[in-house]
Amino acid sequence: MRRRARILAIVSVLALVAAACAGDTTTTTAGGTPGTTAATDTTVAPSTTAAPSTTAEGSGDPIVVGGTLSLTGAFAATGAIHKLAGDMFVERLNAAGGLLGREVQWNLLDDESDTANVAPLYEQLISQDQVDLIMGPYATPNILAAMPVAERYGYTLPQHTAVLAPLMTYACQFPGWSIGPEPNSFIPNQIADALDSLDGAVSTVALLTNESGSTAFVSYGIADDPDDPSTLNILPERGYEIVADIPYPPGYEDWGSTAAQVRDANADLVLMNGLGAEANSLIEAMQQLDYTPPLMFALFPAPGLLLGLGDAAQGTLSVSIFEPNEPILEQMDPEVGEIVDEYAERAAAAQIPYTVFETQAAASWNAWEILVQGVEGAGSTDGQGICDSLHSTGADLTFSGAVTFDTAVNNFWETTEGLKQIQGSEWVMVWPEDIAAGALVGPTG
Amino acid sequence: MIEIQATVSGALNGSLFALMALGLSLAWGFLKVINLAHFAMILLSGYLTFELATSIGLGPIATIVITAPLMFLVGAMIQLGYERFDVSELNSLLISYGLLIITVQVVTNIWTADFLRLPAELNPFSAKSVGVGSLRFPVPTLLAAGSAVVLVVATELVLGRTYAGRALQAFGQDREIASAFGIDHRLLGVLLAGAVGASAAIAGMLFSIGGTLTPDLPFEWIGLVFAIVILGGIGNVTGTLYAGLLVGAISGLVAVVWTPSTSPFVVFSLVVLALVFRPKGLFPQKGG
């Protein structure tokens, strides 16, 4: 009996831990040893020292770029996008003669979507594998974990997607995706700008927020500072009444109850600062209650998934730094079209469900271009040299244009982010008007 | 009114978790196996439902014809393994955790870690609801509730009114004594584990109708499902259903009265209190 009680206690503790982990998107879910090398052609014995090397140009040894991505676990779906974009970039770079006349090899490790794995793996890459350069991991918590290691060893850290700009304090981290230094101000203001153009069709907003770092930051600003810019503050200042404010935990499942609450609020806009498949779940739960909101916004949805809802998701808005809409491609370098087409082909072969080269892949491409242009500017792989070069000359990015880096705003460059909208069977850039590929469609019904 | 709708939606949602908990509770109560591989079978069934529906056009519910027998076999084989190696209750927890991790990785390798959802044209239930007055009963969770009730009633009938059911109860109470009375505990155990596997197939199918598939789903389910097993009473079939409905209803109500973020706090506080004051569950069995 006592043994049974002990087992019951153990299971209860495990269940509580699992529940807590489920709410934390950094759950370890995959087997294998953290750090398993993913790419087949990316492991070499580097010849450099632990500090960022200044190996002479044209030495013939490959330049090894170390980094982790979430190839398994909760972030793996997006990790696969960054891996493919990185593979393509490195292949093109090598085909064009490499970097400083040397071949580039990417030593990519799997952090298993577990933030706890990230810092040790970057320690390993730098101090044991002695890589020449590093590339950041995917997802804000992982990037935050890698940043102190890069800083300790003096490596420049290009990173794809960290949104929490105020926390990215290392002077030599360089974002590939920028929503400016204050995403918590920029995003709600951009939404308000777009709504203003609809001539009063929207006046009330129901706000839903996933309480994880980046989405809560956009809704509520920095924790414990009610005056910090936030969706909750800015929209009322811009004349939009927030009629419901519904925070929910990561891993939330009970969308039926929340849909009832949203229906009851009867807002003109359902503004969901959420992640992944959450917008799908909410839209379907609202459908089950015979309710369709006039207009819907989803902050960071899984690429492509909302399109699968068909008519139910028509008109849904989200954010984007790049969509390969025909009018946009026509204005860009022909190479962009080639990249988009190759990505679609290879993504299909890699069984990535959504094969469109959009924000995530563009951010990855940006990060690699920042690294390469920093090395070329410095003329070496010296970490401080790369950092200084990027601060002095900025970078010219295929998908975001010329950008500059200012340490006063943690290197977050002037954003090119806009709003996209589901129109027909694709996402179409609709805001701001000067980069739009189609017109913003207002509320229905 | 919104409170009533939220409570109803929550309770129906809870019935799906009760369905998941039912198999776990039976295996734990009668076979003395804490089978985390049950979550692996639910996950695999959800993905097989998706695959069969999208690749050969089988209706989501019809996929049960394939997945239930398959999961019956998987469940039975796992139980045979436990029997063969005389795995203890605690070790079954550790071994089945390993099986769960392996399954998650296999699912990731086959279907990728991306979100998968049955397309609207293949899933006529996802956006449907049944209305009674101003209340709406979402069809996916209504199906789950109906399935849970049918399975619970059937299981209670088998346990209470058949020789095999009584033998299982005897086996659950004392293996040696039951064996001494001629009960073939190995065969019964394998059959029960197979049936539990089949119930996992039903739960997986129902989840795929209403939810989005990702390989790490089991880690989101485990906390809530164990809470239901503990609140319902280990091996208490009807108690598991009641606990699922109760947990779901409380979650739904708390979500609208306070916030959705408060729901886990309330539910797991209830679990802690139950462990302290009602360690055999909130719903005592007859003679229990």
Image (cartoon, grey):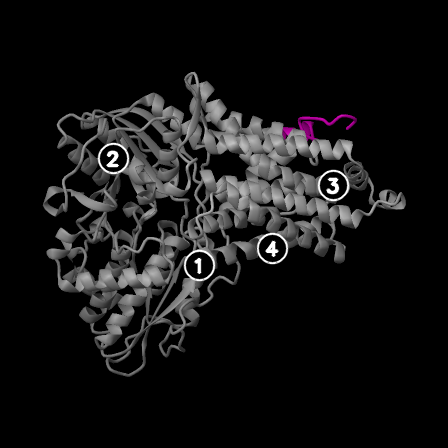
Where are the magenta residues, as a range? B271-288
Residue occupied by mark 2: A229
**Residues at marks 2 and 1, CA–CA distance in whole angstroms:** 33 Å
Residue occupied by mark 1: A111
Residue B30 numbered tag: 3
**What chain letter is assigned to the residue under label 4?**
B
Counting from the top left corner in percent of width and height, residue A274 is at 35, 39
Counting from the top left corner in percent of width and height, residue B71 is at 61, 49
Q: Mark 3: few, some, or many residues within 10 Å (few <14, many ≥20)?
A: many
Q: Nearer the viewer, mark 4 or mark 2?
A: 4
Q: Mark 1: few, some, or many residues within 10 Å (few <14, many ≥20)?
A: many
Three-letter code for the amino acid on which mark 1 is drawn: Asp
Three-letter code for the amino acid on which mark 4 is drawn: Leu
**Residues at marks 4 and 2, CA–CA distance in whole angstroms:** 47 Å
Helix, strand or loop at mark 4: helix
Q: Is residue A387 visible?
A: no
